[in-house]
Image (cartoon, coloured by chain):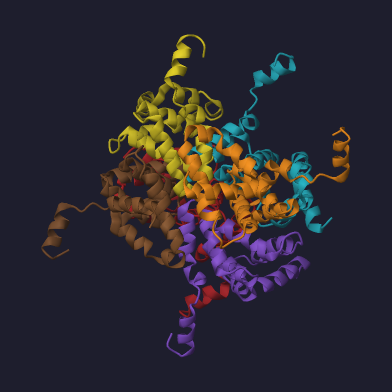
Chain colours: A brown, B yellow, C red, D cyan, E purple, F orange
């Protein structure tokens, strides 16, 4: 376990440990365990762990970049979940995705919103109440 | 002058009025004045003017998206200048550009840093002093 | 209802109202109703509604751009349907998609043709006859 | 000289022979003469020469795709010149470039307009008159 | 049958005839038979058939380019199978996919590895033995 | 100096030390010295230094990926020079660039060939002789 990996795992825990865990135990980890390790070490251990930018800002940058790419759905989903862990509201995340239409066009923005729909739906109070009552 | 345009111009002033001014009086404005107007109305008047996300966060998203595209240098330069108007430090902007290497690869990040080098260089105290003394 | 929205809806009706309807009542509309509105106002109300270019030409441009992007299947499907509403034949649309191989490579062209296969298949007379006879 | 090449050259002449000539005698032709030949044979000899779509429509598709790519300026310039040879007005070409903002974002559209500014400027009568009078 | 097509089919047989066969008899071939033919003639008949580069090197280039695009999964799968036909090991292909993270970012590399997982899994001896024994 | 950095520098020397040196002492290194270090550590120290793929194959992958991106000229130039250090001939590199037309379209291939023209021109014997005689 390199120091960089340990530092990366610490960040992973702040973001959404269990989600990233799921990811590193995935098909990539099975096929290319060194690469699964590098995907923690470099992005999280080297970059996210730096002091120069807070995690909330880093997640805004991540979501905007991933929606711009337009073909990085699994990573976009992970970072939307991470973003809510470090203080972004679902409404703010929706604004960020809408804004990418300016730079990357409407299809990227629309498809990002559609494919992360389940993660971004705010529970309305009555829904939550129904669920508690076992009716949801 | 539509209300959306006026609202967009207000945002433009908060970001870096003179820079965007320079832009709208550019070759695009000469060739397609309606499009230069739309480029204020939709991005700034419709999206930036919304309450759901602060301008500092919007500029993080803009810079990250534009660096990811890799072929939007003029717009990246405008938004780096705007970002410093709404509270981002040059060191934070450098972190955002570095971070795009994760999602869009090293060339995008390296070329963004290189082509905005002049905008991101921090003046060191001694340089500023020399300039005051008329030696810079 | 803004004037731009009304103008956009008029265009939507010329293109393929019911399809776009389906779209605006989709997951995006649920999550970000303002953005679903903007996706009518700006593309259709501001741009398509202009006199400078006929709708047939606009749909050629749309299909070519969306196939070039390579990750905008839902939008490509909508515009292929719209294109047939404004006078493009299926054979012409296939030519447009084939041509994108020049600029964006074979994978984009091949994948666009494959994923819109159902929309572009010409019914042969005998197939239609069979269907009428309840055998299709 | 393959038949495909001859067919391609015929199309090239309809589009803007002299411009494409300039291109095929360029640095690419010097370095990779077979590839310069293929760049006539496949795009023009195989695809453009087909009957299924008129050249005006093919140039709309070309311009829209190249502006969407965002990094194909030399080709965009060639096809804007070709487009005017087959009946598109400069005003129509500007509409096509504006429209790409919907699918590929504002930076692509703005940069395409700016970098082809010289090709798309309509001479106003008074300018032409002045030039004739040796004052332009 | 053009000479180029015959030359292309010869290459196809060296790479993984049956896979490409499957492809040319696919939905694209049904919709646009001329384009299915061109997709053999130009890539294989014109380029792959040239003497200047061995097929192993061509498949490295193909896999790297397709993983970089990030939205060309069907073609990436075909070329991974072709690569193993011309001497690349699965371990080498995994290295090539990992390396694309440098140029195109982690999402492209991770998604390529994940979506070709089934093609890249090495059978471990004990698994093979079990299968022979009818237990796999 | 991390071990990863030292390992990266060793690879850099095998590829074309002086070129990469030039690069790391560039504007990026001035602005973001940590990122210039990371750009050695991760790509070269972590990935290139692995045993699973020879450097010739790695350079084929690099050139193909960078030409596909279409907006990474500085990096493409570095890797074309590196490729010749590890055994690729200029003629082979030209084949690799031509082949990217299949996957990424003609503009990417043409622009890569044009912008690296100076690096790929083979000196003809008579030119070399003239230079020796001080006439070149």
Residue A121 seen from this side: yes
In the image, residue F93 lies at what x, y percent? 70, 52
Q: Residue at the location (76% across, 67% down)?
A: E2
Question: Which one is nearer the viewer's eye here, F38 or E20?
Answer: F38
In the image, residue C34 lies at what x, y percent? 32, 43
- In this picture, is E112 found above or below B57? below
In the image, residue F44 lies at what x, y percent? 54, 50
Quarter assignment of residue D5: bottom right
Residue C18 seen from this side: no
Q: Residue at the location (88% across, 37% down)?
A: F130
Number of labels in the image equals: 0
Q: Residue at the location (50% across, 74% down)?
A: E122
Q: What residue occupies the far left of the structure in this picture? A: A133
Quadrant containing the N terminus of chain E is: bottom right
Question: Which one is nearer the viewer's eye here, B107 or E76?
Answer: B107
In the image, residue F122 lies at what x, y percent? 79, 46
- In this picture, is D117 found above or below F74? above
């Amino acid at each position: 376990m390199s120091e960089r990996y340990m530092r990366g795992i610490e960040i992973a825990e702040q973001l959404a440990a269990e989600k990233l865990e799921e990811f590193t135990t995935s098909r990539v980890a099975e096929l290319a365990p060194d690469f699964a390790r590098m995907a923690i070490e470099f992005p999280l251990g080297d970059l996210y762990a730096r002091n120069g930018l807070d995690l909330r800002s880093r997640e805004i940058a991540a979501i905007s970049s991933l929606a711009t790419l337009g073909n990085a759905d699994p990573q976009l989903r992970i970072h939307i979940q991470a973003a809510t862990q470090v203080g972004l509201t679902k409404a703010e995340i929706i604004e960020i995705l809408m804004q990418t239409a300016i730079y990357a066009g409407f299809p990227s923005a629309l498809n990002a919103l559609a494919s992360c729909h389940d993660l971004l739906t705010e529970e309305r109070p009555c829904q939550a109440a129904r669920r508690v009552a076992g009716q949801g």
